Amino acid sequence: MPQMFSFNIPFYTNLKWAQATMRVLLALVLAYGVSAVNITEEKATCPLGYFPCGNLTLCLPQLLHCNGIDDCGNQADEENCGDNNGWPHLFDKYFGMPSYNTRTRSNICLLGVVPELCQCRDLELDCDSAQLTDIPVVAVNVTMMSLQRNKLQRLKENTFFKYQSLQKLYLQYNRIQDVSPDAFRGLYNLTRLYLSNNKISILMPGVFQDLHKLEWLILENNKIHHISPMTFSGLNSLVLLVLLNNSLTKLDDICREMPRLNWLDLEGNLIETIGNVSFCSCNMLTVLVLQQNKISHIHEQAFSVLQKLGELDLSNNRLVAIPPNLFVLLGDLLQLNISYNPIVELQVNHFDNLYKLKSLSIEGIEIGNIQRRMFEPLKYLTHIYFKKFQYCGYAPHVRSCKPNTDGISSFEDLLANIVLRVFVWVVSATTCFGNIFVICMRSYIRSENKLHAMCIISLCCADGLMGIYLFMIGAYDLKYRGEYNRHAQAWMDSSQCQVIGSLAMLSTEVSVLLLTYLTLEKYICIVYPFQYLTPGWRRTVTILLGIWVFGFIVAFLPLVCKGLFRNFYGTNGVCFPLHSEQPETLWAHVYSIVIFLGLNLVAFLIIVLSYASMFYNIQRTGTQTTKYSNHIKKEVTIAKRFFSIVVTDSLCWIPIFILKILSLLQVEIPGTISSWVVIFILPINSALNPILYTLTTRPFKETILQVWANYRQRRPLLSGHHAHHPSLTWQEMWPLQENSKDLTPGNPLKMTSPVAKLTPVENTNESYNDITVGSQQQPKQCTVLSVCSEKRNVLHTLTHVQTNELI
């Protein structure tokens, strides 16, 4: 002993010394580790909107998180892709599914004789879909009984009393309406009870009083409309209670008899109010699901005892406001979902006490007062879900923010797609150049029909506004390139966005109305030539002014009445109010429908039907002529022009009509489609109108050729030779079918007609179609002819003259 003792003393001393040394070393290591961590953290500090690649100093944009590509090089950007915070929402795969473990259970039936259509393995009975109308009689030592999809209607008293070894009981998908208060007596060892998908409307107090070991109680998809705290008396071990899709309207201290309740699912009921006593005994609750109820009011202290709560789901209710201190004591909350509530405003400090929150869902909520201060206290937040991706700029420290695009814009760029960024400049340049060129040329041609030229110039001005709109969108895309998420919401709320959107709306509506007016003028002129009155200066100017005034009212009314329309033009980054998704206000919704499915649809139908009627009238009248071959050529030419006009109108407006109809049917429309409609499809008419209505018309071509002829004949004059100067007095609808072959540079244009000799004169009455017979003009007809031959020739010549503008 002394020897041993003397041996132990130095050993003990050495041991203490070693322990002290280890403590010092450990302290040094920890100190170095902390400093190293701090240094690493300092080095890993990333700009707003970026996240670090693990312990590297590399920072990547949020958009690259979980994109399926190893952008970091160490897979750090592909970690934590799924939002697994809180409890998983995948318990359904366990509900009602018996578990067989062949390694611990015998394949031999140990229950003796079992009913027909039932299967037995070891001490487990499976009678699913066996057409049973009552509980089968089997050996008393059965441990699992699955009676799913049978015809059970009533659970009588003491039905299971003799099966005291029963551990799992599956009664889903039956027709059970009545459950006796003593139906489950004697089931002292039962741990799982499934009663889902039945027709149970009420559960009497004490019905589960013998189920002391029950852990899971599944009552989803029934018709239960009332429960009291005593309904669950005896459930001392219950962990999971699922009352999903029932008809409960209120809760009164639901956890009083369930002290260990951990998971409570009340989704899909009719609960309207959460009081301060509804969960006052649920101090062990970890998961609380209240989504898809009718909750409009929650008491400020309703969740005060739920200090262990890890997940709270209040989505899809009727909450207009959230009490300021509702989340104050939920310090352990990991996941919070308040999406799709009509919440008007969120307090800046609503989330200040949610220190451990990792997932926050506020989808479907318009946050008018959003600011970074709301989310800065949430240091551990890894996933956040907004209504608009533009809100992500207010939570730049969050690694995963959804949505990261609206199909039009992205975190980095106002126009997310490179193709869109190219097209916006191409279409803008085409639209602006084409319309400016036509305006200049129409002004240069002095002898043209002045009133028609005024209408075309007005149309070009309207279409030019669309080019300016696209140019501005392209310019702001360049301005915000690479950092759009920081400016997105401010841009959409800005006056610049509102004005640009108004210009696009003004261009669209004025263009549509002018095309309709020009179409109706042609239609009346061709279909009813002898009843048509040539429009005068005053009438034409009045109509044009009326169209522009109406267009200004339509475009700028949402800006004047901000209280009714709110941010009408700022629903997306391109500032155009297609409203393919639900708009902000009812007024905006109705206004958008009236414009796009009312006014524009009616105008489109008028244009299509008018051109169809004109073509039919020309074809019918032209068949009366003896020169049928010439008629066929002209008819084909007219058909091509009509087809071009109708097709471009259809390409422009039919997709918009379809989008609006789908939005009315609440069909989800990808934002990518909306972006293509605004950038490419909508400006089609604005870009092609100059070509269809001016550049490819026969009078314009003839004028260009005549200008060239004048130029060619002026050159000899400059060199001292005599030259002939033909007049530039060509009319807008001059018939050129017979004489076009005579039009060559250097030769004057001569015209003959089988009916009368027609000579062009300068437009003195400033009407649409001033064509004289000899030197006389007749004021009443669209095209005046000397009716001195047979009726058939008159009709043919009339149609011949009237349609030249269209080809």
Image (cartoon, rainbow, N blue to C red):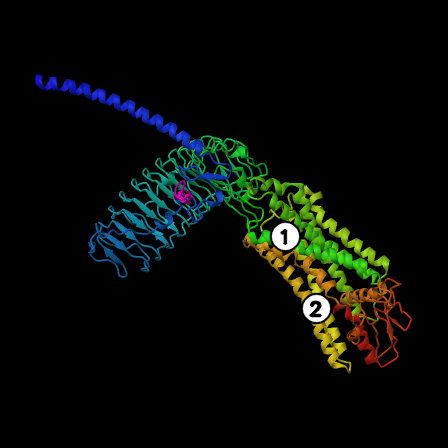
Question: Could you say which quadrant of the image residue 278 lies in?
Answer: top left
Residue 642: give its label. 2
How many neighbours does mark 1 have within 10 angstroms: few (below 14), some (14-19), or many (20 or more)?
Answer: some
Relative horizontal placement of residue 473, taking residue 697 as reference (left or right): left
Relative horizontal placement of residue 632, taking residue 371 as reference (left or right): right
The residue sitting at the right extreme is 776
Picture quarter with the N terminus: top left
| Nearer the observer, 61 or 140 | 61
Q: Label 1, secondary structure: give it.
A: helix
Question: Could you say which quadrant of the image residue 72 lies in?
Answer: top left
Closer mark to the observer between disc 2 and disc 1: 1
Looking at the rendering, the stretch of residues picked out in magenta corresponds to: 72-87
Counting the numbered discs, the total is 2
Q: Locate residue 384, reporting x and y percent.
A: 48, 41
Q: Label 1 is placed on what type of residue?
A: Trp
Mark 1 sits on what residue? Answer: 425
